[in-house]
Image (spheres, rainbow, N blue to C red):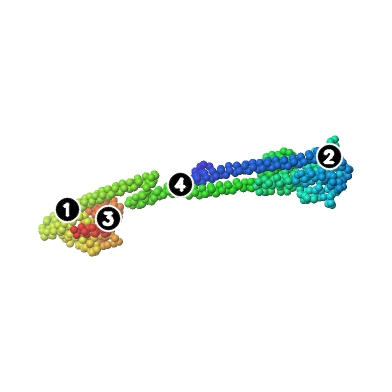
Amino acid sequence: MMRWIREKAFLLFWGKSINYRIFMMTATIMVIALLVLAQWIVNIFSNTLENRAKQNMSNILEQTNKLIDVHINRFVNTSNLIFNDPNMISLCEGMPSQVPDEYYLANTANPIINKYVLSDPSIVSIMLVNQRKHWFIPSADFDYYSSGVPTSIQHYFTFADEFFTRGMIWVPSHPIDYSSKEHANEKIIKLIRDVYNQRVAYEGTMIINISERSISDLFRNVNTPDSTVFYVIDQKSRVISGTDGLQLGDNEEAKTFYAAAKQGDGSMIAEFRGKPHLFVYHKLAGVDWVTVGAVPVEEMLKERDRIVHGIWIVVMVLLIVAILGTWGLSYSITKPIRKLTGIMRDVRSGNLNVKAEIHTRDEIGMLSHSFNMMLNRIGDLLHQLQESHEKEKQAEIRALQANINPHFLYNTLESVIWLAESGDYEEITVLISKLGKYYRLSLSRGMEVVRMRDEIAHAEHYLAIERIRHGDKFSYEIDVDDEVMERECLKLILQPLVENALHHGILQKAGRGHIAIRGRMEDGFIVLSVEDNGKGMARERLDEINSFFRSGRSLDLPSSYGIKNVNERLQLKYGKDCGLFYRSEEGVGTQAEIRIAVNTAVDEALKEAFIR
């Protein structure tokens, strides 16, 4: 499991930004911590409220039981008063063996019985019956003028027969069972007990009809959640009283109440009317009854649900605040890092003229300060390196020129010696004059960059000298655009090419040859070419020379030392895109082409130098 979590976490964070990783990791930890804490608080709070609700319900039921016990004891006490009343015993002993007439009841019996009915508003009526003597004495609520009087009397005779000598008997709640003057359609509870004289001889049966409402009102007046029901049930699972008129019988609802009633005292959660209810039950002290209270769990915990809902709202708000705070924290941490990264990208692209403007006092600020110091140091080192490289290039150029000048002088002096040997002193004069002009242009007051016009003249003096030496062996022409003539270039770049064309092209073939110097502007470059119609060179040799020139590698050309120096000088001065390139066809001729990048700023500087 842990391995799976590690793999998933690796895939989640792999290749992501620091901002994303900080945010996701911090937010995940905070969300999990808040949810776990909230759930823990909700569970503790729910359990506490549920236990408190059970305890409150139990306390309410216990207090109500005490009231019911007081209520029941009052009825029992009333029955004891009747049981011990001498007038009541005398009334029973003097009762004729027949049903008394209305006059007897109104003037003799009713005043004795009615005083007990009037003493307690919960007592509906009191009946004295003796089935053996067939007498029936009701209280004033009994309506003697109703049509069902004989049936009612016979019904009460059955109580005297059924419960004879069984002590004090309670009959559960039932509709009133006689024609009542004031309590029609009410439900009553009966308290039945026998009446004995002083000789402990049976004189009759006393039946006290008690209003069921007097008990159920005790439950209605307590502060309980909505939909709470209360019942008083005897040990035979009969309803003594209840708050919603439920008639318990052989059904699922009744079985739940019966199960609670048999347990005596305690509580349980059970299904009732399609919903879970909390059942709390207590046994009454004065009578063998059990009070049962049933409250819907959702009603009982409605307050808990409201508070829990509020807790979750607070948790959600905290989660949103935490996530926003986490995002702000990760953004504030990574913002200088992103800024520093962007600056590093600029540096990587070659821009060193940047500075990390991060002034925080944390590790990123220290890193930024160190980075700026490093950039300054790199800039200083690059400047020193550039100066050193420039000096090195200048030294190389001067060394190359030093190699070129003695080489040309050696060839020229050979021509002078040859003319002297032939006795042509006039040509020697011309040659020496051309040689002087040639070296005057070569020196160029020590400048390394000259006008193109002077470089063309320099090459032309060389051709004139060589033509004196070789006679009509070759001819030459110069075709350079005026625009090119006004440009600047390195000096001594054409003469080695002309010399190479003459010695390795024209002089190596039979017959007369031709050399042409051309110059033009092309796509921002000065293009100079030296063409000859000499013997040319093989394709393999041509590709080898061009390949070495383009790559900047050293080429072993002992017989053509000058063109190697020309290419190296051009690339050192103008870059790798410039330099020397050859075209040649064996038996047809060769073309040497020079490409020089146009630099307007350099040209203007050279013009100013020439003017001075």
Q: Secondary structure at mark 2?
A: helix
Query: Which numbered disc flags the more N-terminal residue, 3 or 2?
Result: 2
Residue 439 found in image quarter: bottom left
Left or right: residue 543 compared with residue 417? right
**What residue would you read off at disc 1?**
410
Residue 231 found in image quarter: top right
Q: Would you say the residues marked 2 and 4 are in contact, meaning their CB atoms lie under 8 Å apart?
A: no
Depth check, mark 3 against mark 1: the one in front is: 3
Percent across and percent down for residue 52 are 62, 42
Q: Give the Cα distance between marks 3 and 1.
A: 29 Å
Percent across and percent down for residue 414 are 15, 54
**What residue would you read off at disc 2?**
89
Residue 459 appears in the figure? no
Left or right: residue 513 compared with residue 251? left
Q: Callout 3: few (<14), some (14-19), or many (20+) C-alpha neighbours within 10 Å?
A: some
Percent across and percent down for residue 470 are 17, 59
Q: Residue at x 28, y 54 (%)?
A: 575
Q: Give the Cα distance between marks 3 and 2.
A: 147 Å
Q: Secondary structure at mark 3?
A: helix
Q: Callout 4: few (<14), some (14-19), or many (20+) C-alpha neighbours within 10 Å?
A: some
Q: Would you say the residues marked 1 and 2 are in contact, meaning their CB atoms lie under 8 Å apart?
A: no
Q: Amino acid at mark 4?
A: Ile
Q: Is residue 287 above or below residue 389?
A: above
Residue 574: which disc? 3
Q: Secondary structure at mark 1?
A: helix
**What residue would you read off at disc 4?**
22
